[in-house]
Image (cartoon, rainbow, N blue to C red):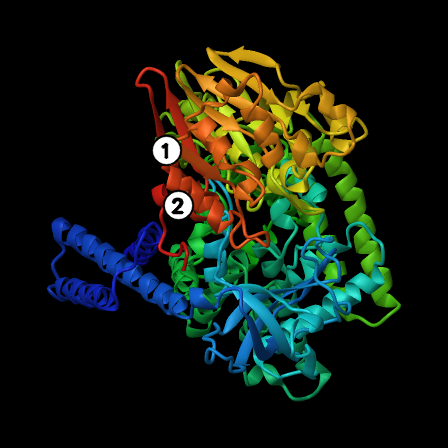
């Protein structure tokens, strides 16, 4: 069975790497093949043969059967989800829908977000729109986007789970930024079964008024989400203006969206991020406490004369009560992968106990793996899946023959003499502390290779931080938070405030730890062979006593320890145009230096192009230093990530056209104004600032676009021109200026994202590029690039590449071969869910 389940997981993993799905017939053929392979395995078992080759053959056949079944099951699930799609022709149209709020709404600075279960769609002039059943909606407050394109109308009312509403919505197909080492929003939407995203239109923009039709629609999922909202409201009202109220909410209902980004930085640097949620440890503790309490009551027949243990043994009742408590807690947690894994393992153990067939823990873990992937084939795409199962696996491996006994062992019946020789409570406590310390050591050491391949960093202080945080959060903060969320006031307020006080003390100490320069070890994401060597070395180090030469496992870590960032070879320049949505951000790399041109857009107070796209990419590459940053001008879609970048990455020098009073200029190290005539060379690569002229800073009639820093990067005969958001007037100045001949470049970053006020034909003829990059957001509200402008590029013979279609675009300039190679992330890393 374990072989078949591992094959099932491998088949699903292989499916998630495919660019296209098989047709329905292909998946059914694989299922049929899996059945035939299982029958063959059964046939071999019936022969009764014990030959080694037959045992090996059965294992191979089980793995192949699981592989076929996993690939087919994952494909069928994916196709079922993808079939519920919004046609491209209906994107951007106003549609009237009726349905229920079926998620926990999240209020943010500009409005509220929630998932919506569509029950019916009003007919339109073009027919009845085929709207997907579940969509993700945002309802923005008046003026949420400023003067340009801002929503108008009445303020956003409160929405609660289970309410039935009529909305006028404008939808689009699932789309997210596609960057190396970045978060894949599109597959996350697919996993959540959200097949369209969109916004609620204001009443002034629609002939139909948005209004509530029913206060509550009773369904199991609505009841759960309503309960989660009720608990969140109680906690937030009991802890008004408290800094870590969002952490208390996360511990009770698993909603982490209210935790500030600065706090996440502390938790991640100290390695306690796994505790700031409903983890497997919390679920097991609550299940055990509730089961023990209910079993105690059952033994005493609830203090009646019913003699309930004669009807059903108290241990079995305790198991049922514990499983019920675990189920409720997991539902409150939002059914995350670690919570699922814990629940399924507890269910398997409980079922085995009830049937009198306690089995080996590896079977329990395998069954939990199968159930998780059966309901969620996309779970293995996320780090939590690997860390959750990896932690359990490494503990089982390292504890073999050392700590405790096998769960399948029969309970011992002790003689009076043996009971007399039982260890004292102090000895038991010492043994428990040793076991806990050893388990922490195993998890710390065992998960290091996996953590490095997933995140490119590891908290060196995590053993110390977890040694304090685990007992405090698990035994103090979490129970107080749970009791405080359900008990009546004022007791609830006292308990929640006590939990918050303990948490506040803990975070202050963690903040001090996180501030230490040696807190985190950062390195590039290792290639697979480096990870495999490190994992093999770790398994050797944690092997059972008596295993020869365990110390040799240290040598398996050497490639991981000495893994260094990659650089372009001599005579090369690499340029990465990030997919940051409607904004600009390009990384220019020479053999010894790196420059970032623009820092991406500002999304929200907690999110921008730097901390969502640029910094994760740099961290994954092992880059913690930039030689220069050029911020072309002050618009948020170009400078929005600057402050976040300065906090995370060391920068030597900043060039910009921003005013001296700008917060970015004040925070920038060694700031210099962009001025035409500035030049420098790195590793044989020339950097020339062509605009703006120094006199432009003396006039206040120009918009920020007009002062965009225009930078040309040249390697031999090849060059790329980065003009920011200059428009027709500035293009004319450059074309008719003294340095017009220096405009010639092979690659042009389309000025102002291809707006209607830029990319004049005279400018394009002067630059004469063969390739143009358009950094634009999917279906952006400015309609960039303008169709007529994009057609102009094509008419002149310039190939256009768009980030919203290609994802991140990578260019490699090679002086030796005198060519430019181009890679599009969505093509090189094609997946079946892209654009679906």
Q: Where does the C terminus fall, quadrant-wise?
A: bottom left
Instruction: Name the image quarter holding residue 27.
Output: bottom left
Disc 2 target residue: 826
Instruction: Tell me the residue at 44%/24% (across/down).
Output: 745
Q: Nearer the viewer, residue 432 or 606?
A: 606
Disc 1 target residue: 822
Is residue 12 left or right of 584 when viewed as pictured?
A: left
- SS under mark 2: helix
Q: Nearer the viewer, residue 417 or 87?
A: 87
Does residue 498 appear in this view? Answer: yes
Instruction: Tell me the residue at 58%/35% (across/down).
Output: 615
Instruction: Tell me the residue at 75%/42% (across/down).
Output: 507
Residue 605, percent across and down?
72, 47
**Mark 1 surroundings: few (<14), some (14-19) or many (≥20) residues within 10 A:** some
Is residue 182 left or right of 237 when viewed as pictured?
A: left
Residue 68, percent across and down?
24, 59
Farthest residue, direction bottom: 306
Mark carried by residue 643: none
- SS under mark 1: strand
Instruction: Name the image quarter holding residue 72.
Output: bottom left
Does residue 426 appear in this view? Answer: no
- Choose mark 1 or mark 2, whichever is in front: 1
The reply to whether the C-beta atoms of the residues labelled 1 and 2 are less than 8 Å apart is no
Instruction: Tell me the residue at 72%/59% (across/down).
Output: 479
Residue 591, percent across and down?
45, 16
- Depicted 513 relative to depicted 110: above or below: above
- Depicted 537 relative to depicted 197: above or below: above
């Amino acid at each position: 069975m374990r072989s078949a389940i591992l094959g099932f997981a491998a088949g699903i993993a292989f499916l998630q790497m495919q660019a296209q799905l098989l047709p329905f017939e292909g998946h059914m053929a694989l299922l049929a093949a899996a059945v035939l392979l299982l029958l063959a395995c059964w046939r071999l078992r019936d022969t009764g043969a014990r030959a080694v080759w037959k045992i090996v053959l059965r294992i191979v056949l089980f793995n192949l059967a699981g592989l076929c079944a996993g690939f087919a099951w994952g494909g069928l699930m994916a196709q079922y989800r993808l079939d519920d799609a919004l046609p491209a022709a209906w994107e951007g149209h106003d549609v009237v829908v009726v349905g229920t709020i079926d998620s926990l709404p999240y209020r943010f600075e500009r409005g509220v977000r929630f998932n919506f279960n569509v029950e019916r769609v009003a007919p339109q002039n073009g027919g009845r729109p085929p709207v997907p059943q579940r969509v993700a909606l945002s309802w923005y407050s008046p003026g949420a986007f400023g003067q340009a394109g801002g929503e108008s109308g009445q303020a956003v009312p409160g929405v609660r789970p289970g309410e039935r509403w009529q909305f006028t919505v404008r939808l689009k197909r699932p789309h997210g930024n596609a960057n190396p080492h970045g978060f894949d929003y599109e597959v996350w939407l697919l996993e959540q079964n959200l097949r369209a995203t969109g916004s609620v239109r204001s009443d002034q923009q629609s002939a139909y008024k948005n209004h509530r039709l029913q206060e509550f629609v009773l369904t199991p999922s609505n009841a759960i989400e309503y309960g989660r909202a009720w608990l969140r409201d109680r906690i937030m009202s009991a802890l008004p203006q408290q800094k870590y109220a969002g952490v208390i909410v996360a511990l009770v209902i698993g909603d982490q969206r209210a935790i500030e980004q600065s706090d996440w930085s502390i938790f991640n640097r100290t390695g306690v991020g796994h505790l700031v949620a409903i983890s497997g440890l919390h679920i097991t503790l609550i299940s055990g406490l509730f089961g023990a309490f209910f079993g105690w009551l059952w033994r005493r027949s609830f203090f009646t004369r019913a003699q309930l243990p004669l009807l059903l043994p108290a241990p079995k009742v305790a198991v049922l009560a514990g499983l019920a408590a675990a189920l409720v807690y997991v539902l409150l947690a939002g059914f995350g992968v670690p919570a699922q894994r814990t629940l399924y393992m507890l269910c398997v153990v409980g079922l085995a106990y009830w049937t009198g067939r306690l089995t080996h823990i590896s079977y329990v873990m395998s069954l939990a793996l199968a159930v998780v992937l059966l309901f969620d084939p996309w779970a293995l795409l996320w780090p939590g899946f690997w860390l959750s199962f990896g932690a359990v696996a490494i503990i089982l491996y390292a504890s073999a023959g050392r700590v405790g006994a096998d769960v399948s062992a029969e309970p011992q019946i002790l003689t009076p003499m043996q009971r007399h020789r039982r260890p004292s409570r102090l000895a038991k406590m010492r043994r428990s502390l040793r076991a806990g310390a050893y388990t922490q050591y195993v998890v710390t050491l065992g998960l290091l290779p996996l953590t490095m391949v997933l995140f490119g960093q590891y908290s060196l202080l995590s053993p110390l931080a977890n040694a304090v945080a685990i007992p405090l959060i698990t035994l103090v903060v979490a129970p107080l938070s749970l009791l405080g969320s359900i008990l009546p006031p004022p007791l609830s307020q006292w308990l929640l405030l006590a939990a918050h006080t303990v948490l506040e003390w803990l975070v202050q100490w963690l903040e001090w730890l996180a501030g230490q320069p040696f807190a985190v070890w950062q390195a590039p994401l290792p290639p697979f062979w480096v990870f495999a060597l490190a994992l093999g070395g770790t398994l050797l180090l944690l092997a059972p006593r008596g295993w020869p030469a365990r110390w040799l496992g240290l040598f398996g870590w050497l490639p991981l320890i000495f893994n260094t960032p990659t650089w372009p070879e001599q005579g090369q320049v690499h340029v990465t145009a990030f997919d940051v949505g409607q904004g600009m951000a390009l990384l220019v790399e020479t053999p010894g230096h790196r420059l970032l041109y623009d820092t991406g857009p500002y999304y929200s107070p907690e999110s921008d192009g730097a901390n969502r796209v640029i910094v994760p990419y740099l961290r994954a590459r092992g880059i913690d230093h930039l030689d220069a940053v050029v911020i072309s001008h002050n618009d948020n879609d170009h400078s929005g990530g600057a402050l976040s970048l300065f906090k995370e990455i060391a920068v030597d020098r900043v060039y910009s056209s921003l005013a001296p009073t700008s917060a970015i200029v004040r925070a920038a190290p060694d700031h210099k104004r962009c001025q035409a005539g500035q030049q420098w060379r790195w590793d044989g690569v020339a950097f020339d600032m062509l605009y703006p002229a120094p006199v432009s800073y003396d006039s206040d009639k120009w918009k920020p676009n007009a002062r965009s820093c225009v930078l040309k990067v040249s390697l031999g005969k090849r060059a790329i021109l980065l003009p920011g958001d200059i428009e027709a007037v500035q293009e004319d100045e450059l074309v008719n200026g003294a340095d017009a001949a220096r405009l010639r470049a092979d690659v042009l970053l389309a000025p102002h994202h291809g707006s209607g006020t830029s990319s004049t034909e005279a400018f394009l003829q002067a630059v004469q590029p063969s390739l143009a990059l358009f950094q634009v957001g999917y279906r952006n509200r400015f309609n960039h690039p303008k169709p007529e402008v994009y057609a102009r590029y094509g008419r002149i013979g310039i190939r256009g590449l768009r980030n919203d279609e290609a994802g991140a675009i990578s260019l490699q300039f090679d002086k030796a071969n005198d060519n430019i190679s181009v890679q599009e992330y969505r093509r090189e890393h094609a997946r079946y869910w892209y654009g679906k």
